[in-house]
Amino acid sequence: MTTAPRTPYEALGGAETFRRITDRFYDLMESDPAYAQLRAMHAPDLAPMRSALASFLGGWAGGPREWFEANPGRCMFSVHADFPIDADTADQWAEAMERAIDDAEIENADLAAQLSQRLTTMARGMAKVPA
Ligand code: HEM
């Protein structure tokens, strides 16, 4: 008997999928000049981010909660509070993430589309409104 996947994390393909999305996301950020402004906000070495984002996204989607256990009570919006995120950089993040999710060729296309949409909403919510 097969059991239905219990979490979006499992339904999306588990750790391997989140690692694939994250690696593609930072590869795009490093190679496509359309994301130069976004790239410039990050540290020169993106290796720690590749791990942190994969771990955060996996836990957020219902998988292992390593990132949350390592960062008790840390809110993702507070993490970004000091970065000068405007509508352009938020859109760069959302677009690179949408492409990374598309390129990951996730079998469950509906869930992949929902993932994209929710992360876009989250990224846009991080943009500071100009004074
Ligand atoms: C809105 C556009 C966004 C921009 C411009 C942005 C930028 C950044 C920057 C500059 C850092 C620090 C990286 C470093 O030290 O090299 C960071 C950290 C991080 N960001 Fe974003 N980010 C955005 C949206 C998001 C979203 C929507 C998520 C999650 C869904 C996210 C997840 C993370 C994570 C997990 C970290 C690492 C936190 C840690 O473990 O210390 N970011 N972000």
Image (cartoon, rainbow, N blue to C red):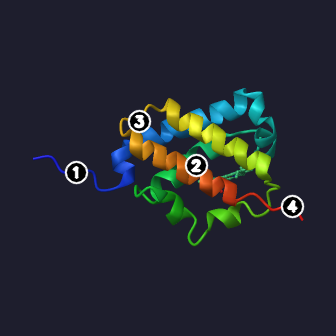
Check residue 4 in the rendering and tell me which mark sits there, or answer none. Answer: 1
x and y, in percent, of residue 34 in the image: 76, 32
The type of residue carrying mark 3 is: Ile
- Cα gap from disc 4 to disc 1, whole angstroms: 46 Å
**Label 2 CB sits under 8 Å from any ligand 1 atom:** yes
- The residues bearing labels 3 and 1 have C-alpha atoms spaced at a distance of 17 Å
The span from disc 1 to disc 2 (Cα, nearest Å) is 26 Å
Element at badge 1?
loop
Mark 3 surroundings: few (<14), some (14-19) or many (≥20) residues within 10 A: some
Check disc 3 and report the residue beneath it. 106
Q: Quadrant of residue 65?
A: bottom left
Q: Which mark is residue 53?
A: 2
* Residue matched to label 4: 130
In screen coordinates, is 83 left or right of 103?
A: right
- Label 2 CA crowd tier, 10 Å (few <14, some 14–19, many 20+): some
Callout 2 secondary element: helix
Q: Is mark 3 within 8 Å of ligand 1?
A: no
